[in-house]
Amino acid sequence: MNGETNGYDARTGDGLEQLVTEDMLNALQVVVADKAELYRIADENLNRLTVIYELTKAILSMSDLDELLRKITEEVAKLFNASGSMVRLLEDEKLKIKASFGIPEGIIDALTVGLGQGIAGTAAMDGKTILVKIGDDFGKIAPVINLQTAINIPLKLEDQVIGTFGIFDKRAADGTVISFTEDDVQILDGFASIAAIVIEKFRMYDNAVRQEREAIKIKEEVEELKDYLQGLIENSPDAIVTYDLNGVVRSWNMGAEKMYGFSRGEVTGGHLPFVPEFLVEIENDYRNRVKRGDTLKNIETIRRTKDGKLIDVNLTLSPIKDANGNIIAISGIARDITEKKRVEKDLIRRNSEMQRLLFISSTMRGELELDRLLRMVLTAVTMGDGLGFNRAMLFLVDEEKQVISGAMGVGPGSDEEAWAIWSKISIEQKSIHTIMDEIRTGPLVKDSFMDRLCCGVEIPLDDVTVLTRAVKERRAFNVVDIHTEEFSDTILIQQLGTTAYAVVPIVSKDRAIGALWVDNIFSRRPIMDHDMEVLQGFTDQMAAAVENAGLFARVTRAEQELENIFESITDLLYVVSADYTILRANRAVVRMLNKPVEEIVGKKSFEVFKDVDANWHSCTIPPGEATKNAFIQELDDPRSGGAHLVSCSPILDNDGELVGTVHLVRDITEIKKLRERVVFTERMAALGEMAAKVAHEIRNPLLSIGGFARRMEKKVEPGMKEYARIIVDEVGRLEGILNDALSFVKSAPMQKRATDLRDIADNVLSLLEPAAFDRGNLLRREIGEPVTVMVDYDRIKEAILNIVTNANQSTENGTIIISAYKKTDAAGRRVAVVEIEDDGCGIGDEDLNRIFDPFFTTRSTGTGLGLSITKRIIEEHGGWLEVESSVGKGTKFSVYFPVEE
Amino acid sequence: MKILVVDDEKNILKLYEEELGEEGYTVVTANSGKEALEVFDRENPDIVTLDILMPDMDGIQVLRQIKEKKPQTPVIMLTAYDYRDDFSVWVSDGYVVKSSDLSNLKAAIRQIIEKK
């Protein structure tokens, strides 16, 4: 379109009418349409600018970078009808997505690209905006996601790229993807330059805020540390003082106030107040060294407190520097080591004492003889080389008697003696070694003045004196002056003339076994706390040895007692080794074997005992050898007629091996008899009960039979009378048996009275006279003196009658002698004896043991209860029966009664 | 003279009844402890003979009750068994071991009558 050609001035509009033709109109229409399009676009761009402006304002008011970026991506994508958008920022040479819109979450991380990689990487590296239109070949800038159109703009601050901004896939109204325009690029460029600045500002702001926060935190920590340090300094028991290079005090903590006695107010601003004059030079020297930058650690020096006392301190001096490292002041930390120093000195002294004590006690530990040990202890206590006391006495607790008794004393008896001893020792120069050795090996004399004095002393534990308290409370006592001590031991004071003394308990295993008493009567040296410590230390060392020796003495005594028991035991007791050698045998063995000890001990047991009896021989060989168990056996000795209880107990060594056996042989003849009697009595009781039951059941029918037979006898004709009589007699016989049985169990109370056995013998003989006559027997009584015993007359009569009846029945044309007398039996008891002797048929050995059994009888007639009743009656009286018999020669019953005189 | 004879066996009662009857005594009988007390109350006998072992109430209990009722009535204990150890028997007036020969019992009865 050219205005001059058509006579139209476009600048003025003149000639417009002339120009208007059909063509022109058509052309105009086109122009107008173009203009309208341009206008529309301009308007649209204006709108966009407005929106960008608004957006820019909005983002400027935002406070959070992430939120800001998210907003930018969203708004810009909408504004340009883009499918999505993203902001990448350059971090560590990578472009990382910081915010995006329209991109699935899952692939965001994959969109991080390096410089030169993809569209964004290229845009960032070149610093140029890239526009990709439909149909463009991406070439080497192939995008990492599948897209068709895109704009990517580097975000720049001056020439520095800080990131990129990209939008992609513009959509037309119908949703198809179209290309972005140059206008889009321009508008987005403008926005991007603003956004870059805003983002950078945000980033700087964020950094500043973070730095600020960190600064505040560090400041707080520093404050805290400062408080802590201040507290530490303030509360430290150490004196912490700071002062300037001229020695003017700057700070003064509580520890310093306490240690030196000066308050903070008194010293601040003044010169150091605690340096003693004699140390001023040295102190200056220290200060100069610190000024040069040295730190002086653990200097031990002396300070003077406000009240003028000198104290030992451990001092550390360090320089205080300002920020530039210049030394501006000095800090001094001091610790009071006065106590430590004292303990140190103490330790050194104690160490040397302990060494001496250890030596002394080591020489004594092995000593087992109590008296020697005590002498050693006391000598050590009194020697100058030892503990150096003038006199010492040992008391031991006697737990049986509940007293503390003096065991030994050492010390001169008088001043003169004291001088004599001291000078002698100094002349002889005997060492403690020598003296200990002398006590150990030399003769032990125990009769010095102190010994005599000491051994008489016995103080009941119940008394309250220093000595008993020392033992009971296990506490040492230092009686500095007897006149002021309430519980001083008057006995000792009187006898020893002491005015001051000390007592320490001897404690072994938490038990006070005695006490050590000391004094310094001749030298008059006061007993100090330190002496007490040494003394206690010494007794602690000695206690175990004294206790051991005490135990040893007790063991020795116990051994002696055992020996006595071994010897005096009435049972045979002997010890045999594993090879049957008799190692020991007590007196009872010697007596039994009737051989000298030399022929028993050391000999083989089977040889020693073989002459005695076969049974003895068998029991000398330890049957426990195989089993190692104790073995007890009852052996009858036919030779002596006795019974013996033999026990063999193995002696095992620590490995459980048999080394020998102990044999104990007890004569149990008497016990066995007694036991048999008990068994018999029990059997009788059982039988008796049975008999009683049977008797009762039988008696009633018998009564009816017999009673009516009697009635019949009276009424029937004479021929029948005989039959009735037979029934009556037979029933009578049965009832007799029952009566015997009943009298056997009947236990009416005994009525003992003084009875002359002669009377009973007479009575029995007269009763039996007719029966004896029938059998042609002669009855004889051979009793001279009256034999009086306390018995139930009727029962004993019955008992004796049974025996005599028995004798009569087993004798024909013979003599029955009844005699009685008193004698002393083998066991030394007084007994009365009744003997009934016949010369009848006698009793066989096999029957002899059974004649006292109920119902035992050898005759066709008789109940068999007579002798068992007799035995029972005799035993009720505490007596016993003995029978001797030989077949064809006769029998002798002896009845024994104890005599109560 | 009325005698109460107590025994749990009828045969024995019959025997005593006849024998003592022949001696001239009036005899009443009871064959249990309980009956004995009833008969005792009813008949008011002069003498009682008591068997000791009886099934329902033994003679010692009967003795005790009779002595509580009428202490002056003499009681003779008759037994198949020796009961002299029992303290209760001591309060009785006689003690006879049962036997087919009644002479011991008769003697005891006579002794009691004579004492009266």
Image: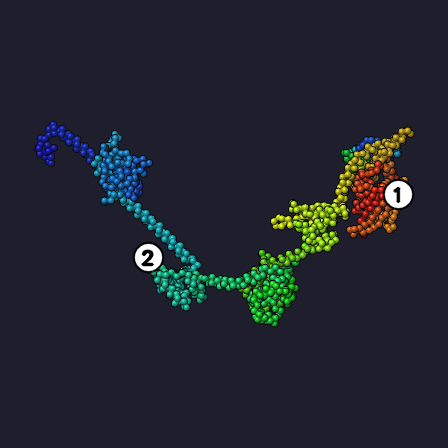
Check chain identity for marks 1 and 2: say if they share one.
yes
Which amino acid lies under the numbered mark 1 shown in the image of this protein?
Gly
> Residue A182 falls in which quadrant of the image?
top left
The disc placed on residue A814 is 1
Looking at the rendered image, the disc whose residue lies closer to the viewer, 1 or 2, is 1
In the rendered image, the vertical position of residue A339 relative to residue A784, given as above or below:
below
| Residue drawn at (33%, 48%) of the image | A213
Residue A844: % across, % down: 81, 41
Estimate the x, y position of residue A358 in percent, counting from the top left. Answer: 55, 61
Dot 2: few (<14), some (14–19), or many (≥20) neighbours within 10 Å?
Answer: few
Q: Secondary structure at mark 2?
A: loop
Compare residues B92 and A873 and report the one nearer the observer. Answer: A873
Subunit bearing disc 1: A
* Residue at left offset 40%, top offset 54%: A228
User: Spatial distance from mark 1 to mark 2, Cα to Cα?
Assistant: 149 Å
Side of A315 where A196 appears, left or right: left
Identity of the residue drawn at 88% across and 30% down = A723
Task: Kindly tell me whether residue B106 is visible in this rendering.
Answer: no
